[in-house]
Amino acid sequence: LRGEIDDKNWDVNPQEILFKQNNFQNKTYSINKLEAFGIFNKDHYRVKKIDLDLTPIEINELFKSPELLIAKDTVVALRIILKANMNLLFLKDKSLKEHFFYESFTETRELINHKYLKVNDGSLLLHENKMYIAQLNLLFSDCSKMKKINVLEFDLKSLVEKFIAYNDCMGCSSVCYV
Protein backbone atom coordinates (compact mmCIF):
# COMPACT_ATOMS: atom_id res chain seq x y z
CA LEU A 1 0.00 0.00 0.00
CA ARG A 2 1.53 3.31 -1.05
CA GLY A 3 0.67 6.75 0.22
CA GLU A 4 1.79 9.28 2.78
CA ILE A 5 2.37 8.79 6.49
CA ASP A 6 2.14 11.81 8.74
CA ASP A 7 5.82 12.02 9.72
CA LYS A 8 5.86 13.07 13.35
CA ASN A 9 9.61 12.48 13.91
CA TRP A 10 8.63 10.08 16.66
CA ASP A 11 10.78 10.19 19.76
CA VAL A 12 8.72 7.40 21.29
CA ASN A 13 7.87 4.56 18.89
CA PRO A 14 4.32 5.08 17.55
CA GLN A 15 1.21 3.16 18.59
CA GLU A 16 -0.67 4.39 15.52
CA ILE A 17 0.00 6.18 12.25
CA LEU A 18 -2.01 8.64 10.18
CA PHE A 19 -2.02 7.48 6.54
CA LYS A 20 -3.29 9.10 3.33
CA GLN A 21 -3.51 7.19 0.07
CA ASN A 22 -3.60 9.37 -3.09
CA ASN A 23 -6.60 11.72 -2.83
CA PHE A 24 -8.46 9.71 -0.22
CA GLN A 25 -9.23 10.83 3.32
CA ASN A 26 -6.69 10.39 6.09
CA LYS A 27 -7.05 7.14 7.98
CA THR A 28 -5.55 6.23 11.34
CA TYR A 29 -4.11 2.74 11.67
CA SER A 30 -3.29 1.13 14.98
CA ILE A 31 -0.01 -0.78 14.83
CA ASN A 32 -2.05 -3.88 15.78
CA LYS A 33 -3.43 -3.77 12.22
CA LEU A 34 -0.02 -3.43 10.51
CA GLU A 35 2.92 -5.70 9.73
CA ALA A 36 5.36 -2.93 8.79
CA PHE A 37 5.48 0.70 7.69
CA GLY A 38 8.07 3.25 6.74
CA ILE A 39 8.84 6.69 5.46
CA PHE A 40 10.87 6.73 2.24
CA ASN A 41 14.56 7.51 2.83
CA LYS A 42 13.93 7.72 6.56
CA ASP A 43 12.64 5.35 9.25
CA HIS A 44 11.25 1.88 8.71
CA TYR A 45 9.37 -0.16 11.32
CA ARG A 46 8.40 -3.78 11.79
CA VAL A 47 5.41 -4.58 13.96
CA LYS A 48 6.14 -7.54 16.22
CA LYS A 49 4.57 -9.38 19.12
CA ILE A 50 7.40 -9.71 21.62
CA ASP A 51 8.20 -10.16 25.29
CA LEU A 52 9.09 -6.67 26.54
CA ASP A 53 11.20 -5.80 29.58
CA LEU A 54 9.21 -3.21 31.55
CA THR A 55 11.57 -3.16 34.53
CA PRO A 56 11.96 0.47 35.67
CA ILE A 57 15.18 2.36 34.87
CA GLU A 58 14.81 5.49 36.99
CA ILE A 59 16.96 5.25 40.13
CA ASN A 60 14.04 6.02 42.46
CA GLU A 61 11.92 3.27 40.83
CA LEU A 62 14.49 0.47 40.60
CA PHE A 63 13.59 -2.88 42.12
CA LYS A 64 15.49 -4.12 45.16
CA SER A 65 15.90 -7.53 43.54
CA PRO A 66 17.30 -8.89 40.29
CA GLU A 67 13.80 -9.86 39.08
CA LEU A 68 12.68 -8.63 35.67
CA LEU A 69 9.20 -7.36 34.85
CA ILE A 70 8.35 -8.90 31.46
CA ALA A 71 5.16 -8.16 29.52
CA LYS A 72 4.42 -11.19 27.35
CA ASP A 73 3.11 -10.93 23.78
CA THR A 74 3.35 -7.13 23.59
CA VAL A 75 2.64 -5.63 20.15
CA VAL A 76 5.14 -2.89 19.29
CA ALA A 77 6.51 -1.07 16.25
CA LEU A 78 10.28 -1.66 16.23
CA ARG A 79 12.46 0.76 14.26
CA ILE A 80 14.94 -0.99 11.99
CA ILE A 81 18.41 0.28 12.81
CA LEU A 82 20.40 -2.30 10.86
CA LYS A 83 18.95 -4.59 8.22
CA ALA A 84 21.19 -7.53 7.42
CA ASN A 85 21.38 -11.26 8.18
CA MET A 86 21.09 -10.32 11.86
CA ASN A 87 18.95 -7.20 12.26
CA LEU A 88 19.22 -4.64 15.04
CA LEU A 89 15.90 -3.09 16.05
CA PHE A 90 15.06 -0.28 18.47
CA LEU A 91 12.14 0.80 20.64
CA LYS A 92 11.76 3.80 22.91
CA ASP A 93 8.70 3.20 25.07
CA LYS A 94 6.35 5.69 26.70
CA SER A 95 8.50 5.74 29.87
CA LEU A 96 11.42 6.77 27.58
CA LYS A 97 13.25 3.50 28.22
CA GLU A 98 15.39 2.46 25.26
CA HIS A 99 15.16 -1.16 24.17
CA PHE A 100 17.34 -2.96 21.62
CA PHE A 101 16.36 -6.18 19.87
CA TYR A 102 18.03 -8.65 17.58
CA GLU A 103 16.09 -10.23 14.78
CA SER A 104 17.30 -13.39 13.08
CA PHE A 105 15.51 -15.48 10.49
CA THR A 106 13.76 -17.35 13.30
CA GLU A 107 13.21 -14.99 16.23
CA THR A 108 13.09 -11.47 17.61
CA ARG A 109 14.35 -10.98 21.18
CA GLU A 110 15.19 -8.11 23.43
CA LEU A 111 18.77 -7.54 24.56
CA ILE A 112 18.55 -7.13 28.33
CA ASN A 113 20.51 -4.65 30.44
CA HIS A 114 19.06 -4.87 33.92
CA LYS A 115 19.79 -2.39 36.71
CA TYR A 116 18.58 -3.01 40.25
CA LEU A 117 19.34 -2.08 43.84
CA LYS A 118 20.91 -4.45 46.34
CA VAL A 119 21.37 -4.05 50.09
CA ASN A 120 24.96 -4.62 51.17
CA ASP A 121 26.08 -3.94 54.77
CA GLY A 122 23.09 -1.66 55.30
CA SER A 123 23.78 0.38 52.14
CA LEU A 124 21.76 0.35 48.96
CA LEU A 125 24.05 -0.27 45.97
CA LEU A 126 23.31 -0.07 42.25
CA HIS A 127 23.95 -3.32 40.40
CA GLU A 128 23.89 -3.86 36.66
CA ASN A 129 23.31 -7.27 35.10
CA LYS A 130 24.55 -6.92 31.53
CA MET A 131 22.73 -9.97 30.19
CA TYR A 132 23.04 -8.55 26.67
CA ILE A 133 26.76 -9.41 26.63
CA ALA A 134 26.07 -13.13 27.15
CA GLN A 135 23.20 -12.92 24.64
CA LEU A 136 25.48 -11.39 22.00
CA ASN A 137 28.32 -13.85 22.67
CA LEU A 138 25.90 -16.73 22.08
CA LEU A 139 24.30 -15.02 19.09
CA PHE A 140 27.64 -14.27 17.41
CA SER A 141 29.29 -17.60 18.29
CA ASP A 142 29.00 -18.94 14.74
CA CYS A 143 31.54 -16.34 13.57
CA SER A 144 35.01 -17.60 14.47
CA LYS A 145 36.60 -14.21 13.67
CA MET A 146 34.69 -12.37 16.40
CA LYS A 147 36.34 -12.17 19.78
CA LYS A 148 34.33 -12.87 22.89
CA ILE A 149 32.72 -9.68 24.18
CA ASN A 150 33.73 -8.84 27.74
CA VAL A 151 32.88 -5.14 27.82
CA LEU A 152 30.35 -3.34 25.64
CA GLU A 153 28.33 -0.21 26.29
CA PHE A 154 24.57 -0.62 25.97
CA ASP A 155 24.09 2.16 23.44
CA LEU A 156 23.23 2.55 19.77
CA LYS A 157 26.75 3.25 18.50
CA SER A 158 28.37 0.29 20.29
CA LEU A 159 25.65 -2.17 19.30
CA VAL A 160 25.63 -1.05 15.66
CA GLU A 161 29.40 -1.57 15.47
CA LYS A 162 29.09 -5.13 16.85
CA PHE A 163 26.19 -6.03 14.56
CA ILE A 164 28.05 -4.68 11.51
CA ALA A 165 31.15 -6.69 12.46
CA TYR A 166 29.07 -9.85 12.87
CA ASN A 167 27.16 -9.38 9.61
CA ASP A 168 30.40 -8.65 7.73
CA CYS A 169 31.89 -11.83 9.19
CA MET A 170 28.88 -13.83 8.00
CA GLY A 171 29.02 -12.39 4.49
CA CYS A 172 25.77 -10.43 4.84
CA SER A 173 23.64 -12.06 2.15
CA SER A 174 20.62 -9.77 2.69
CA VAL A 175 20.16 -6.03 2.20
CA CYS A 176 23.00 -4.71 4.31
CA TYR A 177 22.68 -1.70 6.59
CA VAL A 178 19.94 0.87 6.70
Image (tube, rainbow, N blue to C red):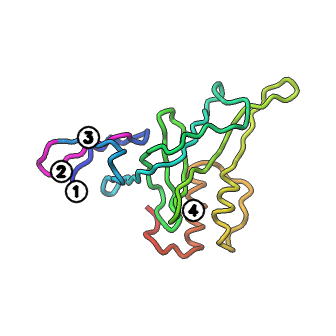
Q: Earlier in the sequence, mark 1 or mark 2?
A: 1
Tell me how far mark 2 sits from mark 4, CA to CA: 36 Å
What residue is shown at x 57% (from left), y 74% (from top)?
170
Q: Earlier in the sequence, mark 3 or mark 1?
A: 1
* Pointer 1 residue: 2
- Decide: marks 3, 1 in contact (CB < 8 A)? no
Q: Earlier in the sequence, mark 2 or mark 4?
A: 2
Q: Say which quadrant the C terminus sits in.
A: bottom left
> Range of the magenta residues?
15-25
Q: Which of marks 1 and 4 is nearer the N terminus?
A: 1
* Pointer 2 residue: 21
* Pointer 3 residue: 28
Number of disc labels: 4
What residue is shown at x 32% (from left), y 42% (from top)?
30
Tell me how far mark 3 sits from mark 2, CA to CA: 12 Å
What residue is shown at x 64% (from left), y 65% (from top)?
140
The crowding category of the residue bearing disc 4, from other C-alpha atoms within 10 Å (few below 14, some 14 to 19, many at least 20), is: many
- Decide: marks 1, 2 in contact (CB < 8 A)? yes
